[in-house]
Amino acid sequence: MSEVNVFKQPKPFYLIFSVEFWERFGFYGMQAILTVYMVNILGMSEAESFTLFGAFSALIFGSVAIGGWVGDKILGTKRTITLGAFILTIGYSLLGLSAAGDVGGKELIYIAMGFITMGNGLFKANPSSLLAKSYEENDPRFDGAFTMYYMAINLGSFFSMLLSPWIAEKMGYGMAFGVSAIGLLITMVNFMVMGRIVKNIGSKPDMSPVNKRYYFMVVVATVAFSFLSAFLLQHLFYAHAILVVIGITIVVIYFKEAFKTQGLERAKMFVAFVLMLQGIVFFALYFQMPTSLNFFAIHNVSHDLFGFKVEPEQFQALNPFWIMIASPLLAILYNKLGERFAMPFKFAFGMVLCSLAFLILKFSTGFANPQGIINSNWLVVSYLLQSLGELLVSGLGLAMIAQLVPQRMMGFAMGMWFLTSATAAILAGWIASLTAAPEGIVEPTQSLILYAEVFGEIGYVTAAIAVFTLLIAPKLTRIIQGKA
């Protein structure tokens, strides 16, 4: 059997790769500076910006299932990608306008975030769906294609997280958000011009002429839901209440389906649920990057990296950097260890690494200079640990669902996995708000004490969860293997 060349992929792959690269470029460029913009330009408190960002992230993840359904059943995957990119462009453009002092930034930002929520919801699920349809069944290049596709996400986020903070500092936030909009414009033009490459690929509606009535209805619904999202972001009680109701409903449906099954199938569904709970813990820590960790870098970390001056928000680019470095190494490790490193152990070790990522920051505060500033190398190591944890938990989440949940419930369970991110985003906003400096505390030596306390609490609580997950991992593994 000849060796598979993962770099020799069908033409649609390269188009979809570029589309995903530019969309993620826009999204992560916006995310890197959004909370700082809320505080520095719009005058929000740190706690207010963190809570709002958490709700915003929750709505984004909660809307993904809508876009997948519209792409599969209503408009077609390709039309939904284009529409999602257009709505995102509007959202980023509105963010840029909110940075203009005479336009009313604090009111406009909610509308902008509403459009970004729905644009992301329409877009996010569909490029990967289109990519999957570009390969015949059992194509040996399939796994390699999705590994490289994940690389597109990290390349886009890496470059935009480096670029956006620098542009915001040198040219203003309006220009920085404008760069995100430009990324989406490139996505749209690229996809429309090169669309012939994927002419015969897509969902069932893609193969028929556009139904103008359906298209109009989707556009109207998208705009309406964008304004609804804006309303919810201004009234977070309702946003949280809706998430609770949806969450309880989905969990009830999941267990109702689980109890309809028997034996190994039911046991695997219970294991999947336990791992989803671990996923909530992970994502609550992951969302600290654009919130508490971002402001920790601003207040208490030296603004240089290996001797080069950097904007503090640029430290977030360490996450995709470490992901790109570590991904192939972990893939080799998985192949060597095989079933000895089963999914429950991967999730458990991911928890251990996330715990260490925060404990090392608490430890680092003991080495701060008299002004309350720590060396940036501590943050580099913390991001390395958390990125490795991401690869073990987030990077394998969908694979875990595919492995443990019955095929008839696959779409529902995939949506449930995204709900873990939405739930965690709300929790993350609350956790991040604990690090927000009370009014009047402006000195780094004062904020350092607060960060040391909160990061220590995060690290120790996560360590306790990690120990528990390590203890139950052998049992969960035996259940998956049908040996329990």
Image: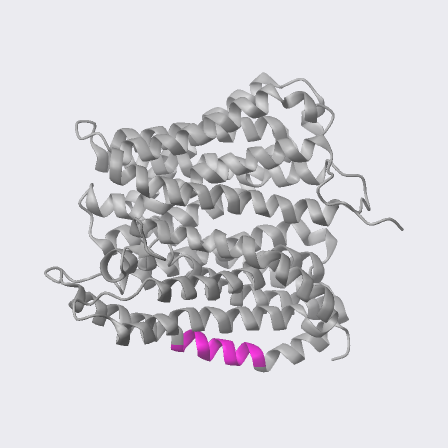
Camera-nearest residue between 283 and 370: 370
Q: Position of residue 167 (x, y in %)?
A: 31, 37
Number of marks drawn: 0
Which secondary structure class fits the magenta region best? helix
Q: Residue at x 58, y 67 (%)?
A: 275
Q: Residue at x 46, y 60 (%)?
A: 283
Q: Is residue 462 magenta?
A: yes
Farthest residue, direction left: 440
Q: Position of residue 152 (x, y in %)?
A: 56, 42
Q: Position of residue 441 (x, y in %)?
A: 13, 63
Res 203 seen here? no
Q: Is residue 52 above or below residue 278?
A: above
Q: Name the side, left or right, on which 187 lies relative to 439.
A: right
User: Magenta segment, which residues?
Assistant: 460-470
Q: Name the side, left or right, on which 103 lies relative to 475.
A: left
Quadrant where the C terminus sits is bottom right
Q: Name the side, left or right, on which 94 lies relative to 216.
A: left
Camera-nearest residue between 90 and 240: 90
Q: Position of residue 111 (x, y in %)?
A: 32, 34
Q: Residue at x 38, y 61 (%)?
A: 427
Instruction: Give the image quarter of residue 46.
Output: bottom left
Q: Residue at x 52, y 60 (%)?
A: 390
Res 439 seen here? yes
Q: Name the side, left or right, on which 108 lies relative to 442.
A: right
